[in-house]
């Protein structure tokens, strides 16, 4: 791997780690604000475990904080995937060198 490519991926990993850290802190704050019961309902909705008959009314009941928490979960999922991919690429490239 070219030094520039390796440096780019290493910098990307640092940025991904920082983004994950910030979102985890925001997730923690929102969970405290929403309470255990509401977070449990949101997890059920997020994991598509909610009965279909309840899903529409639940969506309508979601406020800004609820939507923000589900957005954070989506973003964290994508960031973790990107971080894992970058880590695999670095390990693969380092084993070749």
Image: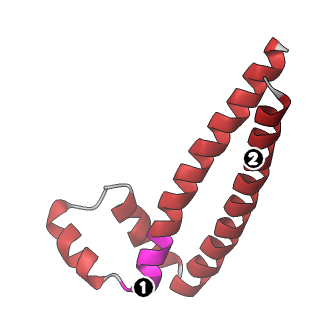
Compared with residue 90, is residue 23 higher up or lower down, i.e. above or below? Answer: below
Element assignment for label 2: helix
| Circles 1, 2 touching at the beta carbon (< 8 Å) | no
Residue drawn 14% across the image and 66% down it: 53
User: In the image, which residues are magenta?
Assistant: 63-70
Which residue was labeled with disc 2?
Answer: 13
61 or 16: nearer the viewer: 16
Quadrant of the image containing the C terminus: top right
Most foreground residue, 10 or 20: 10
Label 1's element?
A: helix
16 versus 59 height, above or below: above
Question: Dot 1: within a 10 Å radius of its alpha carbon, few (fewer than 14), some, or many (20 or more) residues?
Answer: few
| Horizontal relation, residue 89 to residue 39: left or right | right
Query: x%, y% of residue 93?
Result: 76, 21
Q: Mark 1 highlights which residue?
A: 64
Tell whether position 10 is magenta.
Answer: no
Q: Is residue 91 left or right of residue 56?
A: right
User: What is the residue that sits farthest to the left in this orientation?
Assistant: 53
Q: Position of residue 56 (x, y in %)?
A: 18, 72
Residue 68 within the magenta-colored segment of the rendering: yes
């Amino acid at each position: 791997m070219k030094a520039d490519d390796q440096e780019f991926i290493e910098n990307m990993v640092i940025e991904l780690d920082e983004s994950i850290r910030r979102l985890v802190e925001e997730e923690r704050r929102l969970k405290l604000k929403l309470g255990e019961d509401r977070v449990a309902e949101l997890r059920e909705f997020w994991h598509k475990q909610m009965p279909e008959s309840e899903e529409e009314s639940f969506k309508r009941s979601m406020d800004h904080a609820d939507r923000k928490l589900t957005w954070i979960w989506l973003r964290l999922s994508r960031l973790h995937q990107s971080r894992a991919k970058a880590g695999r690429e670095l390990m693969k490239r380092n084993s070749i060198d």
